[in-house]
Amino acid sequence: MLALPVTSQHSALQPDRLPAGPLDGLYIHVPFCRHKCHYCDFYSIVGQTEDRMARFVDLVLLEADFWRRHRTVRPATVFIGGGTPTLLPLGDMRRLLQGLRRRFDLANVAEWTVEANPATVDDDYCRMLLDCGVGRLSLGAQSFRPGELATLQRNHQPGDIARSLDIARRAGFSRLNIDLIFAIPGQRLNQWSENLRRALELGTEHLSCYALTYEPNTPLAVKRRRGAIQPVEESLELEMLRHTRHVLAAAGLPAYEISNFAQPGRECLHNLMYWSGGSYLGLGPSAASHIHGWRWRNRPHLGDWESALVEGRLPAIDLEHLTPAQRAGELAMLMLRTARGIVLDDYLSRTGIDPRKAYQTLLRQLVAAGLITAGPTALTLTEAGVALADGVAGEFLANSAGPDPCRDSAFLA
């Protein structure tokens, strides 16, 4: 078993000097994939051996050991994403889940999610996840149409989606999510509507629906730049978004966040934690963390992440401290994405700031533009505001002070 020194003179991040307080969430990034999808810019690698995956589990638990020695980790939610976490061999995933339980206090976890590719789900794996405490499965379906899956370079077939949902339900999963992507090149509104219909027919209680984004240097972005593919018109993308909200609300899955829809009581607690500005710890290469105004990410390279850990250093980079004004602006931006919006009393109690006063001029402009409704208890996006959510939310950051680089900080060795 790997062992990390209790103290290290080389560690840049000093966990015991971070602000005290509870951690709301725990995220583990498993970077392995069978194939790199052409739209994805998350850190992932292909072609890894089972020995390398076993070593990866050792290293995640090594990273967990370090944090256990420096603070209490008692999250309310756990999320294992990727990559494709279910590519880990069954025994290694079991060892990861059980190892996390031995190192952290997970007795009060209200939700434990694992992401899965529909082609990687089988009975034994599902039963193992349930036995280890995982209660929610999130399937990266993206589309039910073979041509759209080919455009995205997904490595599963439409039939795998229904098959994997059936396997998960028979194993005992009662909380399931399907991810879908719209505004795929060449996609028409009726084709997107058919994807929604098929997802609803499968009886899922939660859907995540994202507009395709062309992240820099991804194969799809390169094809777009070369003119090999054409993105859908912006007007069609907005029509697809409006259609999604209408169809899913009518089916009993109202939007509780810009891209997420659920039956009441079936919302993803981990994502709600993010959007309410919670504190969370990330383990694994590229995983992000945010602890009470301090945030960083792990090195986004498996070898660099490993080297730091075996040398007795946490693999943190891009450490920054948010000023109170920046934290307030970021919280406003996150809360505004939810259906509840910026709840005035909650925001005031957490920041000491009345948003109606702090953003008085901005709010006047946004209300006049028909983008925000200023109610007696909350500030919420209008339907027009939802279509421009990123820009509207960004205005709150633009009206706040920026983050302070943490050079010369007590949090650095």
Image (spheres, rainbow, N blue to C red):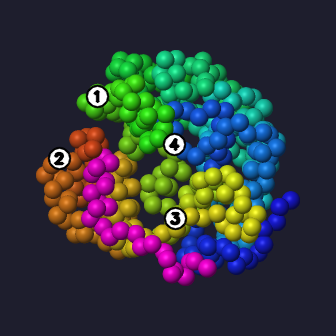
Residue that carries the numbered disc 2 in the rendered image: 370
Residue 152 higher or lower than 289, as above or below: above
- Are the two marked residues, 3 and 4, in contact with CB atoms closer than 8 angstroms? no
> Are there few (<14), some (14-19), or many (20+) residues within 10 Å of tag 3?
few
CA gap between label 1 and label 4 equals 23 Å
Residue under the image location 71 percent in, 36 percent down = 47
What range of the chain is rendered magenta? Answer: 389-413
Horizontal side of 143 relative to 239 (left or right) equals: right
Which residue was labeled with disc 1? Answer: 233
Front in this rendered view, residue 42 or 89: 42
The quadrant of the rendering that contains the C terminus is bottom right
Does dot 1 land on a helix, a strand or a loop?
A: loop
Is 374 in front, or is 291?
A: 291
Image quadrant assignment for residue 85: top right
Judged from the image, the secondary structure of the residue bearing numbered disc 4 is loop
* 366 relative position to 190: left or right: left
Q: Is residue 182 visible?
A: no
Image-quadrant location for residue 334 = bottom left
Q: Is residue 341 magenta?
A: no
What residue is rendered at 60% in x and 64% in y?
A: 316
Kindly state the secondary structure of the residue where label 2 is placed: loop
Residue matched to label 4: 41
